[in-house]
Structures are given as C-alpha cells and as structure tokens.
Image (spheres, rainbow, N blue to C red):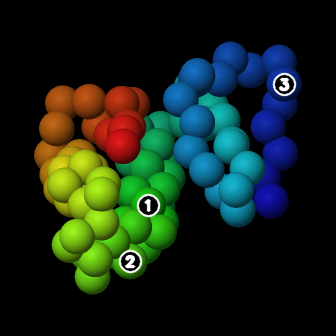
Amino acid sequence: MALIDNSKKIQKILYSSNETEQPIPSDMPLEGRQALAREWRNKELDKTDWIAAIPDHGSYDDYMTYRTNLRDWPSTDGFPDTKPTL
C-alpha cells in the first residue's frame, strides 16, 4: 500500500484498485503512470471477458467497442491520461 503526501498535487485521473479509486500523483514519472494505466486496462479487459461469449447481449456491440478501445489505448495520444469509457 502506498501512501500519498496530501501536500502534493495529484491528477484528477483515477484508476481503480480493489473497487476503490486511487489518485495518481502528478509528479509520478510517465513510465509509472503508464504502468498503472496498463494495469487498470488489463483489469477492465478481465472484467468484461464474459460479454464476448454472449453475442446476443443487449450491450454486446458497446462492450466490444470498449474492449477494442482498451486494447488500442496505449497507442493513442491520450495515453495514459484519458481513459476509454463504456
């Protein structure tokens, strides 16, 4: 568990960890922010794996687009600061 000095500025972008949103310090090096973003992305892909087996689900296309956006995210200009959304 990492403690964050409250006197430091933090980014408004949050990544979930064990169902709790954790802020990423704005002074964290880019490589660290990217690693946390990839970890969050991988968890999101794991959480949405189930939908791939249910093509007649009402939100199937939305989930498939979201999953594609998650996979492509590291190669976009917004990475790691702008998360894909469902």
Instruction: Quickly name the residue at label 2.
Output: 50
Residue at 48% across, 56% down: 40
Q: Residue at x 44, y 61 (%)?
A: 44
Q: How many marks?
A: 3
Q: Does 23 sit left or right of 60 as displayed?
A: right
Give neighbour class at mark 2: few <14, some 14-19, many 20+ (Cα, 10 Å).
Answer: few
Earlier residue among tags 2 and 1 = 1
- Type of the residue with mark 1: Glu
Mark positioned earlier in the residue sequence (3 or 1): 3
Q: Position of residue 9 (x, y in %)?
A: 68, 17
Q: Which residue is mark 3?
A: 6
Tell me: residue 2, above or below residue 82. below
Q: Position of residue 80 (x, y in %)?
A: 36, 38
Q: Is residue 60 visible?
A: yes
Q: Amino acid at mark 3?
A: Asn
Label 1 CA crowd tier, 10 Å (few <14, some 14–19, many 20+)? some
Q: Which labelled disc corresponds to residue 44?
A: 1
3 to 40, vertically: above or below: above
Q: Earlier in the sequence, mark 3 or mark 2?
A: 3
Discs 2/1, front = 2
Residue 74 makes an appearance in the image: no
Mark drawn on residue 72 = none
As shown in the figure, which amino acid type bears the numbered disc 2?
Answer: Trp
Q: Nearer the viewer, mark 3 or mark 1?
A: 1
Q: Is residue 63 left or right of residue 11?
A: left
Quadrant for the C terminus in the image: top left
Q: CA distance from mark 2 to mark 1?
A: 11 Å
